[in-house]
Each structure stands twice: as structure tokens, then as C-alpha cells.
Amino acid sequence: MKKIALLTSGGDAPGMNAAIRAIVKTCLHYSIVPVGVRNGFDGLINGDFIEMNYEDVNNIIHLGGTILGSARSDEFRTQQGRSKVVHHFKTAEIDGLIVIGGDGSFKGAHVLSQEMPLKIIGLPGTIDNDLYGTEVSIGYDTALNTVVQAVDKIRDTASSHKRIFFVEVMGRDAGFIALNSAIASGAESVLIPETVTDLDQLISQIKTQNKGKRSSIIIVAEGDDEGGAMDIMRKVKPFFEGYDLRTTILGHIQRGGSPTYADRAFATRAGIHAVEILRMGKTNLMVGIKSDEIIEVPLSDAITKKSIPDVQKERIMEVLLTGSSIN
Ligand code: F6P
């Protein structure tokens, strides 16, 4: 293993820079040349590579986003596009690739590994936390903390004006951010794509829960089957005469910010492990974490299997939250 390329792909996530830093430093520790690929799969197509050194990763562990940039690439989906990548990798004599991203990014890397002699390792990098086989992905903890802090602020103003707020969070078609931020922020209800949303039940439960309270907060996963927060509020508004309803869509602030300890620590450990197993000749694996142990997950599982939130988690949904019927 003489040269390892690394790239960040898909939605950026806080902690990606900690992973980049760990990969570069571990490569240099073993006299392997780390080659950064700029702007994700676009950079692969265009051969936008940069050999990296210690100074490239100095003082970045606390930075959100990704210093390498991230971008999706339609051209990568074509055989012709990928043949450009094969040419660039052969020219640059790259024999290993670490992809920091979500399942879509892993799919692309997996295809590449079948079209050329290239060892591939994936690091789970997405705030959605929807990757199978790992308890958390890089960025998830920071995004959760961002949402909880935002909801605390919304609670302040909701209570001042006796309002009911529908707060939309990211997660694409997964409900991890919604479910766990609802638990930690004391939301009255949470709507997630993995459970069937019963609007009649939600309406009656909001009214019941709101009695004697100055505010109610319903967290809505953007992928919910009944739509986002604006849709939900529009659908239930006719049943809330005399109530003051508002919506907040948190959006891309969930993707930024300085990574928490948890994201920095996992990203660092995973980055080191990725280089170590490439050196051993391993390939087509995703580095994950379970019970604080770094583990290896077949990339094919991370690509094909789905991770869903545990809605029965210590019966929290029944005791603390309402608004979703448990399947
Ligand atoms: O996958 C991460 C994510 O933030 C999703 O939660 C969200 O739906 C999507 O990316 C937004 O994508 P973009 O940044 O391209 O708008």
C-alpha cells in the first residue's frame, strides 16, 4: 500500500475533518502517501488530486464541514465517466481509497472497486445516521446537539406567546435525528418516516398534552409520510381554532458547526482503523462502532441493508412522546 486516496462525499457532516486528519497522519506514520481528492466524486472524474502532508491537517479537528469539499457527480454514474477515474488512479498509482460519506457514496466506490484493482474502505459520514451496521455515523451527534439547542430556543419563544410549533429536522428518509432530538428536547410529539403518522391521533394528543401548558413542540422528520412541518401544520390547522400555530424548518444549520467530542473521537478512531486495515490488504468494508468498539461491516451490507430507529426504545414513545402510532 503506497498511496491511499481519500474523499468526502454526499452531504457534509461535522467530524469529516477529524477523519481526514486521522487518515493523513496515519498514512504518513506508515510512509504511505495520502492523496486528497477534492470535491468528492467530481474530483475523481477530473483527477483533482492533492498529495497531503501534516501541515494540510494542522488545526482542523474542530472545524465543521470538509476541507476537501464534497460534490455529487452524475458523470460518475456512467461507464465513460468511471473510465476517467480508472485512468487517473492508474496514472497516480493509487492502490487504496477511503470514502467518507453515506450509502450513496459507498455504492459508487463499490462499483469502482469492481472495475479496477482498488481496495476500498468506507467511513460512515452523514448526519442522517442511517447506515446499517454502525451505532452512529460521523456528524450525527453534532447534528443532534444543534437541533436540541435550537428547539430549546424555540421553546422559549413558544412559551412566551402560548404557541404550538412544528419543527422540521433533516434525516432524508430516516427518523434518527427527529426521534432522538425529540426525546432530549422534551418535545410533546415526534413524526418519523418509519412509523405511520395518524393525524387524528396527533390532533387529539396535541390538545390533550397542551392543556395547562404554555407551549407544545412537535418535531417532524422531513421524510415523514404526511409531509414536512409546513404540510403537517396546514393539515391540522383547521382543527386548532383559537390556537396559535407556527413552523420552523431548521435546514442546513444541522450540517454545520464544530464537531462534538463524540464525533471527533469516533472520526479519529475510524480514520486510523481504515488505514490500518488497508495496509493489511482488507477491502470492501465500512468502519463502524458498536458499544464503543471499532468494528468492520461488509460494505455490501452498509449499501443494501437499512438501519431504522428503535421506536420501542425503553417505551419512551409511549411514556414521553405521542403523535406516532407504533407499528
Ligand atoms: O444526507 C444529509 C442531508 O442533510 C439530508 O438530511 C438532507 O435531506 C440532504 O442532505 C440535503 O441535501 P442538500 O445539502 O443537497 O440540500
Image (spheres, rainbow, N blue to C red):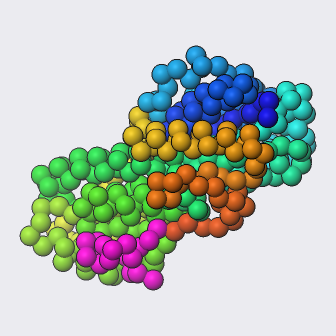
319 in the magenta segment: yes
Task: Look at the image and tell me in which quarter the N terminus lies.
Answer: top right
Image quarter of residue 326: bottom left
181 in the magenta segment: no
> How many labels were placed on the picture?
0
Image quarter of residue 322: bottom left
Q: Position of residue 257 (x, y in %)?
A: 41, 36
- Write the residue at 59% across / 62% down: 132
Q: Is residue 104 visible?
A: no
Q: Is residue 196 visible?
A: yes
Q: Position of residue 73 (x, y in %)?
A: 73, 42
Q: Position of residue 148 (x, y in %)?
A: 31, 51
Does residue 117 sit above or below 197 in this rendering? above
Left/right of residue 213 with respect to residue 33 in the rendered view? left
Left/right of residue 156 with respect to residue 273 in the rendered view? left
Q: Position of residue 145 (x, y in %)?
A: 35, 47
Left/right of residue 96 with respect to residue 254 in the rendered view? right
Q: Nearer the viewer, residue 244 or 52?
A: 52
Left/right of residue 28 with respect to residue 144 in the rendered view? right
Q: Nearer the viewer, residue 17 or 173?
A: 17
Image quarter of residue 97: top right
Task: Look at the image and tell me in which quarter the C terminus lies.
Answer: bottom left
Q: Which residues are magenta?
A: 309-327
- Write the residue at 46% across / 39% down: 264
**Residue extending farthest top:** 55
- Write the residue at 48% across / 22% down: 59
- Write the residue at 51% across / 54% down: 293
